[in-house]
Image (cartoon, helix red, strand yellow):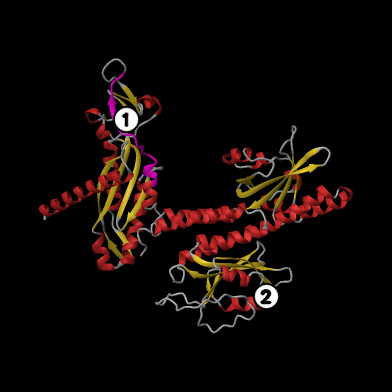
């Protein structure tokens, strides 16, 4: 069973991963990138030591960066392990997704693989980390070639990492492989550009070198017009970019990047500078779909005439974006029903609230006069305390119950309906949690089908659900509660059994000056009032 705080832990891990990936993208050289990789493992993933073993040109792996232990850094840096020993060691390890774990009692022989052994007794328990346990995260290029291996040691707490920590390490290794590939590509491109600038007498040879680096680059490259009426027009695209966008080089020459970018990302492109500019945006493929890419610009200059064109590196980041969205969804949604979880509900509700309490104020020169709120006239002007001058620029969140005179039939507000299932515990106790889980999934489906587009159905945990609906009057909210209760009432078939659950609802209204927790607590209390009332009514009938 997940703990109530696990979604928050996952969200914190997601934020940490985002920051670590951002740090990787700011590294300027291969050496700096490698050091950022191991520092990220130590500072962000809960391990006390990490090393990067990079595949050398001869196929062997050299320890290129170490973090977390000065003694290990001095001993391991520059040490070489043969490719054969590394492949044998990775082959005997237990598969944790893409990771390889080699326990101390496995009986393996490391050969000449550089390892750092520490002394001391292991922690107690079946999942304790032994000083001679080894955990490796292989890194691969986009075509499946081994780039290197991240080795980690000493997980904080002395326990073997759990599934979430393993997935975070695996995700980070994937991002590290992209950063290392990009660092090598940047180094190659920078060397090519330096040759172009310094070897004017060997211009033709330099241009050929640039042409090959451009055409055979593993990721997309484009040369575009810089300045003039045709500014931004694509002059040339390499094969990788043509494959990425599923377009021919000839067809791409009819476009500028502004013609291909997703409409929502056009502002991002326009804000990207030519000299060293970077942007993450979506480009259109031939079939009308969009792919996430990272653009990085460099100016191709002429020694006499100044800037000639813009060289744009286009990197496919679709997989990384997909994984980021998956991590964000898992952190903000209930794993059983797929509904928004408590944290996401509070975030959405808080987005509809403001922290300025309402006070009735008199109009200039006399008593309070009529004002208009949400398209309806009511007899008082409402202004935030200490901010009366902002009345024309601030729309309050108003509960129909709090308007002067109790509101009118036309007044609308933000309604929160707290739902607690009746009879669910008996189903769990009689048939088991697997049947109870199936009931919760079906109730979530029915609630979602019964609300309007734009309304939020969330699961707080257990058999508690919350519906957040904007723009409802009091009668609308009552009708919605009846509709939701009717949707839940029909029998549910689970594993050949027919079970029934009921539901008790409590309705609360959001208002200025209230917190999300206060609104939810109010709805929760009203739900329990209804539940007790329904219980007494059933007893009288019986």
Give the residue at x 38% y 51%.
343
Left or right of 224, for residue 371? left
Q: Quadrant of residue 170?
A: bottom right
Q: Is residue 354 magenta?
A: yes
Left or right of 148, for residue 41? left
Q: Quadrant of residue 427?
A: bottom left
Residue 346 in the image: x percent, y percent? Answer: 36, 47
Q: Which residues are magenta?
A: 347-363
Residue 68's place in the image compared with 404, above or below, is below
| Residue nearer the viewer, 399 or 48 | 48
| Residue nearer the viewer, 478 or 532 | 532
Residue 368 in the image: x percent, y percent? Answer: 27, 20
Can residue 219 be seen by looking at this rendering?
yes
Q: Is residue 83 magenta?
A: no
What distance separates the C-alpha of mark 1 from that of mark 2?
Answer: 71 Å
Left or right of 326, for residue 260? right
| Residue most extreme to the top | 365
| Residue nearer the viewer, 118 or 532 | 118
- Check disc 1 and report the residue beneath it: 385
Residue 450 in the image: x percent, y percent? Answer: 35, 47
Can residue 285 be seen by looking at this rendering?
no
Give the residue at x 28% y 57%.
491
- Check disc 2 and report the residue beneath it: 83
Quadrant containing the N terminus in the rendered view = bottom left
Give the residue at x 83% y 49%.
198
Q: Quadrant of residue 336?
A: bottom left
Q: Earlier in the sequence, mark 1 or mark 2?
A: 2
């Amino acid at each position: 069973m997940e703990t109530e705080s696990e979604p928050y832990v996952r969200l914190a891990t997601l934020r940490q991963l985002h920051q670590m990936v951002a740090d990787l993208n700011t590294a300027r050289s291969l050496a700096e990138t490698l050091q950022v990789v191991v520092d990220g493992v130590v500072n962000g993933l809960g391990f006390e030591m990490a090393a990067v073993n990079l595949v050398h040109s001869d196929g062997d792996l050299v320890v290129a960066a170490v973090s977390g232990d000065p003694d290990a850094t001095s001993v391991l840096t520059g040490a070489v392990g043969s490719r054969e020993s590394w492949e044998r060691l990775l082959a005997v390890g237990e598969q944790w997704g893409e990771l390889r774990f080699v326990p101390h009692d496995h009986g393996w022989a490391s050969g000449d693989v550089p390892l750092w052994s520490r002394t001391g007794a292991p922690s107690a328990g079946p999942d304790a980390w032994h000083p001679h346990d080894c955990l490796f995260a292989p890194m691969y290029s986009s075509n499946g070639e081994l780039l290197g291996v991240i080795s980690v040691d000493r997980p904080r707490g002395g326990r073997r990492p759990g599934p979430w920590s393993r997935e975070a390490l695996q995700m980070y290794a994937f991002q590290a492989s992209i950063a290392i590939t990009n660092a090598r590509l940047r180094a190659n491109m920078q060397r090519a550009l330096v040759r172009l600038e310094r070897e004017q007498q060997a211009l033709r040879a330099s241009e050929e070198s640039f042409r090959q680096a451009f055409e055979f680059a593993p990721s997309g490259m484009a040369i575009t017009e810089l300045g003039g009426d045709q500014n931004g027009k694509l002059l040339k695209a390499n094969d990788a970019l043509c494959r990425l966008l599923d377009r021919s080089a000839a067809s791409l020459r009819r476009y500028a990047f502004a013609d291909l970018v997703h409409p929502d990302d056009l502002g991002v492109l326009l804000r990207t500078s030519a000299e060293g500019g970077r942007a993450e945006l979506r480009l259109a493929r031939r079939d009308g779909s969009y792919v996430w890419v990272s653009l990085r610009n460099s100016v191709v200059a002429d020694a006499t005439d100044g800037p000639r064109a813009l060289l744009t590196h286009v990197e496919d980041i679709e997989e990384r974006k997909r994984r980021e969205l998956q991590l964000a969804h898992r952190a903000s949604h209930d794993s059983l029903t797929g509904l928004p979880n408590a944290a996401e509900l509070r975030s959405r509700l808080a987005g509809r609230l403001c922290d300025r309490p309402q006070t009735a104020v008199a109009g200039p020169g006399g008593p309070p006069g009529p004002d208009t709120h949400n398209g309806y006239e009511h007899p008082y002007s409402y202004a935030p305390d200490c901010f009366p001058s902002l009345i024309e620029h601030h729309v309050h969140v108003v509960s129909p119950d709090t308007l002067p005179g109790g509101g009118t039939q036309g007044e609308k507000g933000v309604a929160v309906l707290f739902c607690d299932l009746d009879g669910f515990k008996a189903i769990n106790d009689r048939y088991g949690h697997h049947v109870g889980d199936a009931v919760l999934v079906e109730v979530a489906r029915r609630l979602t089908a019964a609300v309007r587009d734009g309304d939020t159905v969330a699961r707080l945990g257990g058999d508690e659900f919350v519906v957040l609906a904007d723009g409802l009057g009091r009668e609308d909210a009552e009708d919605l509660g009846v509709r939701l209760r009717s949707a839940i009432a029909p029998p549910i078939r689970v594993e050949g059994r027919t079970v029934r659950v009921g539901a008790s609802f409590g309705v609360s209204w959001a208002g200025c000056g209230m917190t999300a927790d206060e609104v939810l607590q109010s709805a929760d209390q009203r739900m329990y009032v209804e539940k007790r009332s329904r219980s007494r009514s059933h007893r009288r009938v019986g």
